[in-house]
């Protein structure tokens, strides 16, 4: 009888062990399922423009060239007034609001209101573009941290009023850029402009005789 009781006890212990293993496996499977479910479905990878020598980087690392391209693109689009600055500037601020930090948008809206009161927008046409030879270079992007940069944009501004040139100047814009992976549908760059690191400065170029009226 003792032998049978030992056999039954061993069987029960084995069954209990198997049940424990099953519970552990189910727990591991649930954890793996949760990890898979909570993993991001889309990742934005920033690669440098020249890949001839290859590129190895963390997926979250943003190449300085991408930061520069973002800052220039957004700033150029906001300052592009093809027909009437009073309407175009306002429309651009609305269209590119997801590429601006809240504080930067407020600052630009104040700039818009000030220009409108001074009658500097109505029937104004504006274009903004890179100064030839002063495009992207490593020194144009200062890395402050993993999520913050300062981009130096040397740009030319061309403004006209009813077909008459009124402004043709060169400006250096030190722009803050921050990481903002909050809305990939509206902002696939995962970056936002945070306006100016310091006051923009006018540049004196060879042959520049003022050009501003």
Image: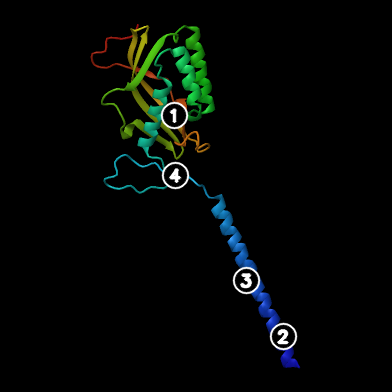
* For discs 2 and 1, the disc positioned in front in the rendered view: 2
N-term-proximal mark, 3 vs 4: 3
**Which of the 4 quarters of the picture holds residue 2?**
bottom right
Regarding mark 3 in the picture, which secondary structure is present there?
Answer: helix
Q: CA distance from mark 3 to mark 4?
A: 38 Å
Tell me whether the residue at label 4 lies in contact with that at label 1, contact meaning CB atoms closer than 8 angstroms: no
N-term-proximal mark, 2 vs 1: 2
- Left or right: residue 46 versus residue 179 is left
Q: CA distance from mark 4 to mark 2?
A: 58 Å
Which residue is identified by label 3? 21
Q: Residue at x 38, y 15 (%)?
A: 126
Which residue is identified by label 2? 8
Measuring from the top left, give residue 114's x and y in whole percent: 50, 11
* For discs 4 and 1, the disc positioned in front in the rendered view: 4
Vertical placement of residue 99 versus 172, above or below: below
Relative to the observer, which residue lies in front, 46 or 206? 46
- Left or right: residue 149 versus residue 23 is left
How many neighbours does mark 3 have within 10 angstroms: few (below 14), some (14-19), or many (20 or more)?
Answer: few
* For discs 1 and 3, the disc positioned in front in the rendered view: 3
Which residue is identified by label 1? 176
Which residue is identified by label 4? 60
Q: What's the colour scheme? A: rainbow
Q: CA distance from mark 1 to mark 3?
A: 55 Å
Q: Residue at x 35, y 49 (%)?
A: 56
N-term-proximal mark, 1 vs 3: 3
Q: Residue at x 53, y 21 (%)?
A: 106
- Quarter of the picture containing the N terminus is bottom right
Q: CA distance from mark 4 to mark 1?
A: 19 Å
């Amino acid at each position: 009888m003792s032998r049978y009781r030992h056999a039954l006890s061993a069987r029960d212990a084995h069954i209990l062990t198997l049940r424990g293993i099953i519970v552990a496996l189910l727990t591991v499977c649930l954890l793996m399922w949760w990890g898979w479910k909570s993993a991001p479905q889309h990742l934005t990878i920033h690669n440098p423009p020249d890949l001839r020598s290859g590129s190895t980087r963390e997926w979250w690392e943003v190449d300085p060239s991408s930061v520069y391209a973002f800052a220039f693109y957004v700033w150029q689009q906001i300052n592009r007034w093809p027909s009437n600055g009073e309407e175009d500037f306002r429309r651009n601020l609305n269209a590119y609001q997801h590429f601006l930090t809240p504080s930067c948008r407020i600052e630009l809206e104040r700039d818009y209101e000030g220009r409108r009161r001074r009658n500097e927008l109505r029937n104004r046409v504006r274009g903004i573009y890179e100064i030839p030879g002063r495009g992207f270079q490593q020194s144009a992007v200062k890395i402050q941290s993993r999520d913050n940069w300062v981009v130096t944009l040397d740009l030319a501004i061309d403004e006209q009023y009813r077909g008459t040139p009124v402004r043709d100047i060169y400006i250096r814009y030190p722009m803050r850029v921050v990481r903002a992976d909050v809305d990939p549908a509206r902002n696939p760059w995962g970056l936002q402009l945070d306006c100016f690191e310091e006051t923009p400065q006018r540049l004196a170029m060879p042959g520049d005789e003022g050009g501003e009226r």
